[in-house]
Image (spheres, rainbow, N blue to C red):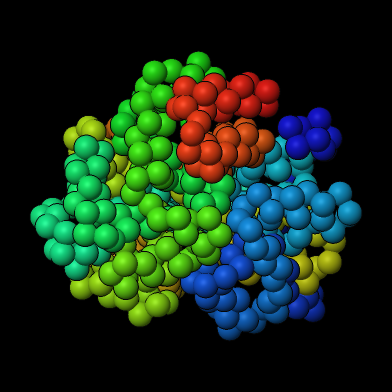
Amino acid sequence: MTKLGFTAVAATGISLALGSAANAEPKTLMLHQWATGSDAASIAILGEMFEEAGGSWEQTAISGHTANTLAKLRSDVIGGNAPAAVQLKGPEIAEWNATGMTSNLDELAASEGWDEVVAPELLPVMKPAGSWVAAPMNIHRINWLWASPSVMEEAGVEKLPETWAELNAACDKVVAIGKICLSHSSADWTDSTLFEVVVYGMDLDLYRSAFVEGDPDAIRSDGMIAALEQFQKMTSEYMDPGIFGRDWDNMPVQVGNGDAAFYIMGDWTIGNFAASGFEQGSDYICAQAPTDWDGAGFILNSDSVVFFQQNDPDYQEGQKLLASTILSPEFQTVFNKSKGSIPARLDVDLSSGFNPCQELAQAELKGSIEEGTLVRSMAHNMTVPQAVRGAIMDNVTEFVATPEMAPEEAANRIADAVEAEM
Ligand code: BGC
């Protein structure tokens, strides 16, 4: 049995054979989480390009972020309706590959030279057992600080905060003029996104042992308690009471409108800003989120698509066409300009109409790799299995909702919950 509870039937899955099946008409049904706003607008681009290439596109978008999509995938597989294509990330790619139900993309990858053009950091994720299982769409950076130049100026904040102490000092000034310092909406994944950025920025090694390895002792440590203290200060002193129930894609609007000074979130925020008509440079600016250590930092998240084996030749043809469309330089350009991420391919020139924040992401990704600070995102399904991630996220959100909870108690609760899942 695999961790997913399915019996593994083959180690590598069945290859998507190249060459066209006679009379097959490529079609797909893709399951994914991009249900609203600029997420939905960006995935629509994939549908359009797939249809332009002769495919017939259908999708099932599941709202409520990744956990709901994973639950739907599981019930579809149990019901005998494994999707032709599904958005899948991190360890789940390896786990579903181990069931033997996913298609092997090696032949297509070799014919299109994926190994030569895809960012090397993505290869272990997309090829968990040495063969291509997932088609990478992008690289998202999580540790971004988005800021309103007008609120900073009004509050007398002269520069973007680079450390957590600088962020606190800036927030004290913003709160003093009656503005929101940190825009936020409390959902499990948004709370944990912010929290992982705090842990990473305070202690890189702690991030690795707690959120990459899932070590309960690291989660109980003094370093984690200190990170929870900083996080609690931010949630209780620097956010507004409206965080409970606010829609997540409205957070950037508070910065764009000049209601909030800062917002810490992944770079899909560029898509949210653009959708609301906000301009980089005047309505918002961007920088690496604070770190108490020097140099470039990068918390990586990557979206990718996995293909479950199908009997119908139309869907088999559709899988090849979809994977090939995803890896095409055209898709990687148009999709990522809209999505806010940077291409998974290294040969796409970002100087042609990408946002300056995206150019900065590419430069700081390189810097972070050179400096050995690159990590994958726990909150965005790139490290620990979903059950462990869920245990962390539930307890982080409970901590946000319970302002009187002591950081030490929260650390112990998260550690206990992780221990129960390991
Ligand atoms: C996904 C992104 C998406 C974001 C917000 C992340 O986990 O990887 O593609 O834009 O969530 O929904």
In the rendered image, the residue lying farthest to the right is: 79
Foreground: 55 or 393?
Answer: 393
Q: Residue at x 76, y 37 (%)?
A: 4
Tell me the residue at 49%/46% (across/down). 191
Q: Quadrant of residue 306?
A: bottom right
Relative to 335, is 101 above or below? above
Q: In the rendered image, is residue 69 in sight?
A: yes
Which residue is painted at 68% across and 55% down in the image?
69
In the picture, which quadrant includes the N terminus?
top right
Whole-percent x, y for residue 239 in the image: 38, 52
Q: What is the x, y in percent for residue 399?
A: 52, 37
> Looking at the rendering, which quadrant does residue 417 occupy?
top right
On screen, 92 above or below 116?
above
Q: How many marks?
A: 0
Expressed as whole percent of the image width and height from the top left, the position of residue 307 reads 69, 56
Can I make out residue 286 in this image?
no
* Residue 36 image point, x, y percent: 57, 70
Q: Residue at x 22, y 47 (%)?
A: 172
Near-viewer residue (119 or 274)? 274
Determine whether, in the image, residue 222 is placed left or right of residue 126.
Answer: left
Q: Which image quarter is the C terminus in? A: top right
Closer to us: 318 or 19: 318
